[in-house]
Structures are given as C-alpha cells and as structure tokens.
Image (cartoon, rainbow, N blue to C red):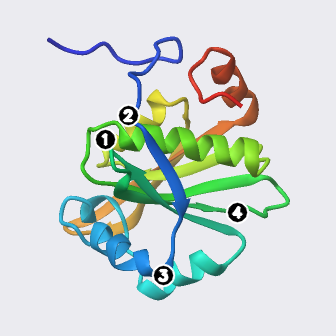
Amino acid sequence: MTAAPMTDRTPAPAPARVRLRPTMRSDLDFVLSLENDGDNLPFITPWERTQHEAAIRFPDFRHFIIEGGSDFAAVGFLILVGCRSQHRSLELKRMVVQPKRQGCGRAALRLAKKIAFDDLGAHRLWLDVKSRNRGAKALYEGEGFAEEGVLREAVKVAGGFDSLIVLSMLRPEFEARRAAALELPA
C-alpha cells in the first residue's frame, strides 16, 4: 500500500512530542556525534566544535537541542541563523534528528517555525537541502515549504558534487497553515 502524498490540504500525521532547549557547551559532544554519524554525513556538511561554540554565543544564532520521547532525552539539534536580521529572513541552517522516522523531526520543525514567526518576528524562513536528501525535502514540502530554486552542483560530496534545493515559507503562508490547524497554535 502506498501512502497518498501530502498537500497543504492534507493534515500531516500527528508529530511526536518534543521540546527545544538552548544548546549548552556540554551538549557539543552529542551534537558532533550526530553530525559525524554515517547516516547523517551524506546529507550535511559538519561543523567544527568552534563553529558550534560560536553559534551558541552569537546573538544572531539560535542553537537548540531537540528533546523527545517519554523522558525527553536528547534526540537531535537544530540551528536558526539570521535571528537579528533587519530583513526578517531567517535560515534553518541545520536540523539533525536520530532516530529517524519517529516524528521528532516534524515536531521539531513545527516548533522551529513557531519560534521563527511568533517569537523572532520572521517574515521568511528558508533552508537548503541536498538534492540527494529526498526524505528531508519531502518533510519540508509536507510542512508547507515552497521550492524556490536549485543551486546546481553547489557542494562537493563523495563521488562528485550535489545540488542544493532552496525552500522557504513566508509569514502569510505560515498564518494560513495555522488557520487550517496545520501549525502549532499561537
């Protein structure tokens, strides 16, 4: 049996229960282990510890640990960039979740959208995803992000180059999804 594709009119399955908390320096071994995990490496470009340390301190960034499950154990992390941008255009720089396909990524993405639009006053939330990362692209599109374009062969990967697909969501789109009960309430 094949699942029907999700559209903006099809409610996504209920996401897992998660929460976000600010990343602390003591979390960085966990963050680096996720980035360097063999399941994640094909889809991200890992940072050095010093880059994560700077992101924790720099006010233009929000670096979060994703906690989930019945005991709210650490299951991932996400980073928002541009939090002080005069253009109110924030980037979801990175989101890594383990284990996969448990609903934690979807739930964390919904929290990130709520933080971006409600708390940080974003007009636009954007991201890029490697073209090989079909699962993540499907998640973002299912959560209302629209494809803006492709940066062809923009990143070097094992065996050659990969393209980056740029996706975004605008505040009116977020508000329309919230009115349709597809987003977390205000």
Between marks 1 and 3 in the image, the one whose residue lies nearer the viewer: 3
3D distance between C-alphas at marks 1 and 4: 26 Å
3D distance between C-alphas at marks 3 and 2: 32 Å
What's the residue at 51%, 69% (across, down)? 23
Label 1 with label 2: CB-CB less than 8 Å = yes
Label 1 with label 3: CB-CB less than 8 Å = no
Q: Secondary structure at mark 1?
A: helix
Q: Secondary structure at mark 3?
A: helix
The tag on residue 138 is: 2
Measured along the vertical axis of the image, is residue 81 above or below residue 143? Answer: below
What's the residue at 45%, 38% (across, down)? 107
Q: Quadrant of the N terminus?
A: top left
Read off the residue under disc 4: 82
Give whichever of 24, 126 is nearer the camera: 24
Is 130 positioned to the left or the right of 41 in the image? right
Q: Label 1 amino acid?
A: Arg
Q: Earlier in the sequence, mark 3 or mark 2?
A: 3
Read off the residue under disc 3: 25
Q: Secondary structure at mark 4?
A: loop
**Residue 144 percent across, percent down from the top left:** 55, 29
Q: Residue 170's image quarter?
A: top right
Is 155 positioned to the left or the right of 59 in the image? left
Measured along the vertical axis of the image, is residue 170 above or below residue 49? Answer: above
Between marks 3 and 4 in the image, the one whose residue lies nearer the viewer: 3
On the question of residue 154 being in view, the answer is yes
On the question of residue 148 being in view, the answer is no
